[in-house]
Image (spheres, rainbow, N blue to C red):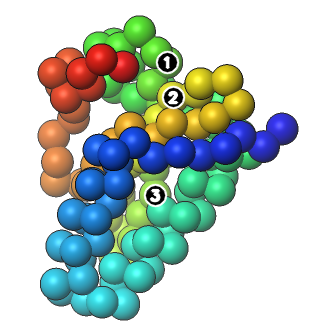
Amino acid sequence: MKFRVRLTAEAVRNQNEIADWIAERSVNGALSWLDALDQVLQQVSTSPMSFPLAVEDEFCDKELRNALFGTRKGRLFRAIFYLDGDCVIVTHLRGPDQQDLSADDLGNL
């Protein structure tokens, strides 16, 4: 079964901020990062349960998982998501230097 993938407004904001930050240093790097994000979201859409629980799972009633993806320079990013029926909801994207999310960051999930 293939799941639909939807990014929340916060995840889209994270995506834009990270891509802009990388683009200030390398436009090609930003394009490569967006491609890596797209690839991991395709993997999530086919087998979301194969990804481990996120450390933030303890703060939420939903089962939060995360998918790691990286850049050519080896920097790891996380896509944090949960399942809602036949849809994968990506709530946040986190960079390698960003702290884990807090209960307040997760709001009303």
| Residue that label 2 marks | 82
Q: Amino acid at mark 3?
A: Phe
| Residue that label 3 marks | 69
- Dot 2 alpha-carbon crowd within 10 angstroms: few under 14, some 14 to 19, many 20 or more: many
Query: Quarter holding the C terminus?
Result: top left
Q: Are marks 1 and 2 in contact (CB under 8 Å)?
A: yes
Nearest-to-viewer mark from 2 and 3: 2
Q: Is residue 49 above or below residue 92?
A: above
Horizontal side of 106 relative to 44 (left or right) equals left
Q: Amino acid at mark 1?
A: Glu
Q: Is residue 81 above or below residue 2?
A: above
Query: Residue at 65% across / 30% down in the picture?
Result: 49
| Residue that label 1 marks | 63
Return the residue found at the far front: 9
Q: CA distance from mark 2 to mark 3?
A: 17 Å
Horizontal side of 62 relative to 101 (left or right) equals right
Q: Is residue 2 visible?
A: yes
**Is label 3 in a helix, a strand or a loop?**
strand
Query: Quarter holding the N terminus?
Result: top right
Q: Position of residue 90 (x, y in %)?
A: 46, 41
N-terminal of the pair, mark 2 or mark 3, is 3
